[in-house]
Amino acid sequence: MTLKYNKIKFPLWQYLKQPVLSGHIKLVLNPYRFAYLYRVELLQRCWTKECDAKGSSS
C-alpha cells in the first residue's frame, strides 16, 4: 500500500471556517499547528467511533 492513498491533505476549509471571535474555542493561525491538531482530533474521533462499534457488538 502506498502512502499517497493514506495521506491526509491539509484541511483548508476547516482552517478557514475557524470561529474568530469565539471565547471558548482557541483560534490557531499557524497552518502547520492547525494541521497537526486537526489530525490528532481526527484520530480521536475515529478511535472513539471504532470503540463504539466494538462495544455495541459484544
Image (spheres, rainbow, N blue to C red):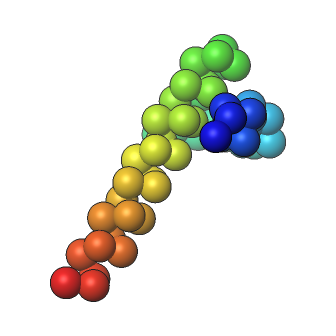
Of residue 1 and residue 35, the one placed in the foreground of this image is 1
Residue 45 higher or lower than 15, as above or below: below
Q: Is residue 21 visible?
A: yes
Q: Is residue 20 visible?
A: no
Residue 36 is drawn in which quadrant? top right
Q: Where residue 10 sits in the image (x, y, percent)?
A: 74, 31
Residue 32 is drawn in which quadrant? top right
Please give left or right for residue 14 compared with residue 51 in the image: right
Of residue 50 and residue 29, the one placed in the foreground of this image is 50
Residue 17 is drawn in which quadrant? top right
Residue 40 higher or lower than 55, as above or below: above
Q: Where residue 47 sits in the image (x, y, percent)?
A: 38, 54
Q: Where residue 30 sits in the image (x, y, percent)?
A: 66, 15
Q: Where residue 48 sits in the image (x, y, percent)?
A: 36, 59
Q: Residue furthest bottom?
A: 57
At 27% from the left and 83% from the top, the residue drawn is: 56
Of residue 20 and residue 57, the one placed in the foreground of this image is 57
At 41% from the left and 65% from the top, the residue drawn is: 49
At 69% from the left and 19% from the top, the residue drawn is: 31
Please give left or right for residue 13 compared with residue 42 in the image: right
Please give left or right for residue 57 compared with residue 9 in the image: left
Q: Quadrant of the N terminus?
A: top right
Please give left or right for residue 46 compared with residue 33 in the image: left
At 40% from the left and 47% from the top, the residue drawn is: 44
